Image (cartoon, rainbow, N blue to C red):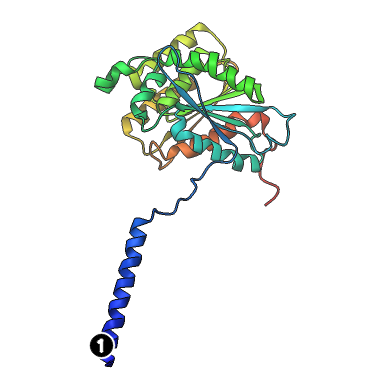
């Protein structure tokens, strides 16, 4: 047999083998890899309520929860759980390691279901009044009072009944409309939580509605014995940033009895990126009275 013929035969064989392998590869399903899961986390779906809302709780338990059944833990409740649960739960470990916060339970509130339009859904829960600036979606807004009642009468009791939650220290946090809701909750039920974190709050929503609501609270003469941390991003949309700065000035002028308040402008950050630093610093601030240590670290 001639060398050239042998070469052609070998080449044809390799081509056939390659085509066969490619065919089998195309027909075989891609290897399945397990999705990443957050250790110590749970998802709990609540029954649909009278308003037709069905909430899902994203819950993260501290590392020591299983090994120290005698302990109770403060709880950080956060709105927009579909976005902010991973932020808060990831921060907890680092802050606990630095001994600037105690271990805490994270309870992030979201919605049950797949492929949901969170931007539209959250208008219902997080806005205290109808927000005409949202045009055709305005009718979906304005139900913060009902949401706050659900948190107070259903979600908090469930968490404190079924987990080793410390009822003496609760924190509420949220960003943007969630920050607006956080401030609304503080003025409506100030004793419901001990600490509040309002990251880049949408205080100008509803034609400055919150400004008037805060003024009514101030005229009532009530004390405000809570810890509040509020923020804005230095590179946010100018009008949005201006609204937050105006609200900060109004709040600073009040000098509410019992209020521990800190505001931070996060330089160089926009509306979403600034939320990470907001939550890190906010958690440190609201938990300062319970921090295991203060001052610079003594180890590395």
Number of marks present in the image shown: 1
Above or below, 81 relative to 187: below
Residue 212, image quadrant: top left
Question: Quick one: which residue is furthest to the right in this view?
Answer: 70
Q: Residue at x 33, y 15 (%)?
A: 130
Residue topped by disc 1: 5
Above or below, 159 relative to 16: above
Whether residue 98 is visible here, answered yes or no, is no
From the viewer's perspective, is 99 left or right of 143? Answer: right
Question: Which one is in front, 25 or 239?
Answer: 25
Q: Residue at x 33, y 25 (%)?
A: 120
Q: Residues within 10 Å of mark 1 (few under 14, many from 20)?
A: few
Above or below, 224 relative to 22: above
Q: Residue at x 64, y 25 (%)?
A: 163
Image location of residue 179, percent across then percent down? 44, 26
Image location of residue 185, percent across then percent down? 49, 17
| Quarter containing the N terminus | bottom left
Above or below, 295 relative to 16: above
Image location of residue 84, percent across then percent down? 47, 34
Helix, strand or loop status at disc 1? helix
Whether residue 298 is visible here, answered yes or no, is yes
Q: Residue at x 25, y 88 (%)?
A: 5
Residue 266, image quadrant: top left
Question: Which one is in front, 7 or 180?
Answer: 7
From the viewer's perspective, is 290 left or right of 254? Answer: right
Residue 168, image quadrant: top right
């Amino acid at each position: 047999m001639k060398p050239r013929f042998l070469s052609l035969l070998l080449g044809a064989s390799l081509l056939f083998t390659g085509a066969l392998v490619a065919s089998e590869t195309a027909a075989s399903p891609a290897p399945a890899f397990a999705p990443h899961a957050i250790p110590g986390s749970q998802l709990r779906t609540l029954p649909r309520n009278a308003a037709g809302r069905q909430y899902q709780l994203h819950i993260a338990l501290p590392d020591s929860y299983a090994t120290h059944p005698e302990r109770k833990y403060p709880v950080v409740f956060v709105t927009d759980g579909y976005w902010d649960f991973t932020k808060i739960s990831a921060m907890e470990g680092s802050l606990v390691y630095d001994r600037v916060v105690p271990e805490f339970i994270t309870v992030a509130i979201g919605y049950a279901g797949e492929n949901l339009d969170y931007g539209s859904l959250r208008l219902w829960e997080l806005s205290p009044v109808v927000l005409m600036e949202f045009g055709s979606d305005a009718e979906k807004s304005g139900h913060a009072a009902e949401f706050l009642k659900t948190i107070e009468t259903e979600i908090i009791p469930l968490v404190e009944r079924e987990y080793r939650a410390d009822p003496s220290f609760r924190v509420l946090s949220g960003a943007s409309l969630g920050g607006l809701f956080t401030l609304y909750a503080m003025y409506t039920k100030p004793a419901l939580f001990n600490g509040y974190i309002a990251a880049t709050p949408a205080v100008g929503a509803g034609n400055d509605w919150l400004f008037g609501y805060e003024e009514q609270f101030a005229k009532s003469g009530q004390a405000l014995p809570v810890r509040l941390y509020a923020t804005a991003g230095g590179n946010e949309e100018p009008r949005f940033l201006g609204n937050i700065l105006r609200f900060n000035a109004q709040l600073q002028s009040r000098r509410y009895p019992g209020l521990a308040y800190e505001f931070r402008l996060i330089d160089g950050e926009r509306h979403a990126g600034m939320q990470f630093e907001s939550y890190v610093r906010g958690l440190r601030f609201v938990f300062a009275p319970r921090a295991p240590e203060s001052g610079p670290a003594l180890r590395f």
